[in-house]
Image: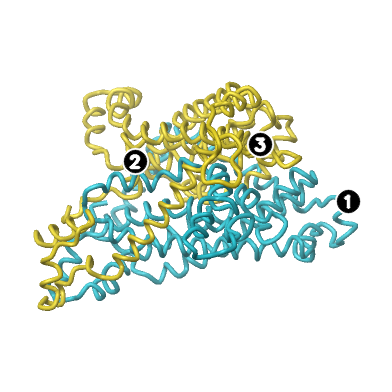
Chain colours: A yellow, B cyan
Amino acid sequence: MTAKTATSGAHGVGSPPTPTKKRSGARAPGERSLAASPTTWFVWAGTAAFFIFLIGILVSVVVDSLGKSWFNTWLPESFSKDWYSNAWGQFQMTHIIGVTLTVAVVVIVISVLVGVPAAYLLARRNFPFKKTVTLLFLLPVLMPPITYGIPLATVMYNIGLGRTLTAVILVNLVPSIPFVIMTMTPFIEQINPTIESAARMSGASMRKVFTRILMPLLIPGILAASILVLVRTVGMFDLTFLVSGPQSDTLVVAIYRAMTAAGGGEARQLISSMAVIYTLTMMVILIVALRFVSPTQLVARVKESRED
Amino acid sequence: MTSPALGSSTATRSTASLRHRLAERGIDTSLLMLVPALVFALALFIYPFTYGIGLTLQPSAATQEKWGGGAFSNYVAFFKDSFVSDSVWLTMRLALPAALFNVLASIPMAFKLRHRFRGKKLLTTLLVLPITLGTVLTAQGLLIFAGRQGWLNRFLIQIGVIDQPLALVNNYLGVMFSLVISGFPFAFLLISSYLSGIDPSIEAAAKTMGADWKQRFRRIILPLLAPGLATTFILTFVLAFSVFPSARLVGDAMGSTRVMALMAYRAFGEQIDYPMASTIAVMMGVIELVVITAVLLWRSFLYKGSTGGKG
């Protein structure tokens, strides 16, 4: 076990240790390490290709947003920050970012307030039609937004909410509430129920159990769910796009509209600078998110691999 | 608890109050906590959806006149108008390979990267990065980076691999790139979490009995991982199936990437034909359900027990 750990650990850094190669001929069948196989090459080549594209995309947008007249050369002729101030003025960025944050905060608050109690019931209790209810909450997460987004947007326009901030918030709640329920249910399940029983036995009311016992334990989970809802809401394109208007566009939708505006869209560099602003916002959110929650822990909480 | 015991307790309980009897079956006032969530789900999801389905049966006069079929005129138009029905095939041609690729490429990656090594956290963080990019920036970046004048083509020409710039954007390939860039990290994260849920001692046992890595992978890991693979495939497929901004921005919106989502939006926003837009949206849901059911059916033949992990 220890030898395996050493080899795979060392290989990850990029220097295959010599013992692996020396021993490879005289190994027992079960001893052959995966590290020596062609899969390794495939994995590293794939990772490299992926990151070349990723970094290329990122860097070229940043360079484009800072460059002046970039056509047929490796780099733009000169650099300036003009595009950012132009974008800021021309697209009312303050307003757009304000709308984006308002929508995100309202959606988070409502979906936590509505979702957490429901998640608690689903995690702790058995009641008739529980499966139906679970399915009802699962559907909006499973279905692509545009399939229910179009009927939903039609309803919004029919009741006169089209292009308003309220409509944008309501529409974003549809996937967010189930999402909070889906992430909080397993989280609540892993909290030991005897703690609550003890509190109940000591005479605490349901409300007190919630505020004094459960809340402190739930804070990490709620924080994680809120951040994920934040990422989803800020990044949500389809639903927002269907109901928003000029005064209620969030950042993503504003960028899309600028790209597809009649007459070939706005200047490419303007869009690049807006896209950079968007990415920076998302990155800050996500870096904060990763401090609170490990992405691989969301699906299953399991013990660390023994070879770790 | 055996059934006779249960029966006798019900008999004695009949004198208790209704409230008590309901509470025994799990119905009491704390269920009220579920009400807000249910109200939202019913008002914002079930009602619009049923309304939309109803709307599909009230075709506009123009549709009815052109395609006939009475109340089902929208569906007749959907299948007979080749401009619309072709988009089904165009969507599948993008979504299925993209989802398959994302899942299949994630398996060896997740497998390789499951051990702890230096820089693992950094690599995971970098892999999550595309989520922050969003479809719109990915599209913008692809247009600049992989365009005719972009760095990629420039580099390939410089080292002499090609002499004409490759057409990588504004076509099928561009949308595929964008789907892989946004879908792969997602698939990778899901699969690595499923993989970490498999108890390593099972594999260690197989190793002790002399199974080589191929046998271990085929006989131990793959059967335990398969349900996770099915779920990941479904989720990435759903993501790829509803591709919309990138199909318009880096694709060929009138040609090879005229996907269903684009058609639905065109009917909704440009032609203001709400019944037809709902019809396309409902058909998207139906086609997706067919694919999901097929995958779930396949999954139901697989091992369904515990993966040995604590979770």
Q: Please identify, in this view, whether the residue under mark 1 or under mark 2 is nearer the observer.
A: 1
In this view of the protein, can residue A134 be seen by the observer?
A: yes
Q: Is residue B294 above or below residue A238?
A: below
For the residue labelled by badge 2, is the local secondary structure a helix, a strand or a loop? helix
Kind of residue sitting beneath label 1: Ala
Kind of residue sitting beneath label 2: Arg
Q: State which chain disc 3 sits on.
A: A
Q: Please identify, in this view, whether the residue under mark 3 or under mark 1 is nearer the observer.
A: 3
Q: In the image, A64: left or right of A263?
A: left
For label 1, the crowd category at 10 Å Cα-Cα, with few meaning under 14, some 14 to 19 and many 20 or more, is few
Quarter of the image for the N terminus of chain B: give it: bottom left
Kind of residue sitting beneath label 3: Ala
Query: What is the number of the mark on residue A102?
Result: none
Residue identifier under label 2: A124
**Residue at 66% across, 57% down:** B259
For the residue labelled by badge 3, is the local secondary structure a helix, a strand or a loop? loop
For label 3, the crowd category at 10 Å Cα-Cα, with few meaning under 14, some 14 to 19 and many 20 or more, is few
Query: What is the number of the mark on residue B61?
Result: 1
Residue B194 appears at what percent x and percent y? 32, 56
In this view of the protein, can residue B238 be seen by the observer?
A: no
Q: State which chain disc 1 sits on.
A: B
Nearest to N terminus: mark 2 or mark 3: 2
Whether callout 2 and callout 3 share a subunit is answered yes
Residue identifier under label 3: A267
Q: State which chain disc 2 sits on.
A: A
Q: Is residue B304 above or below residue B251?
A: below
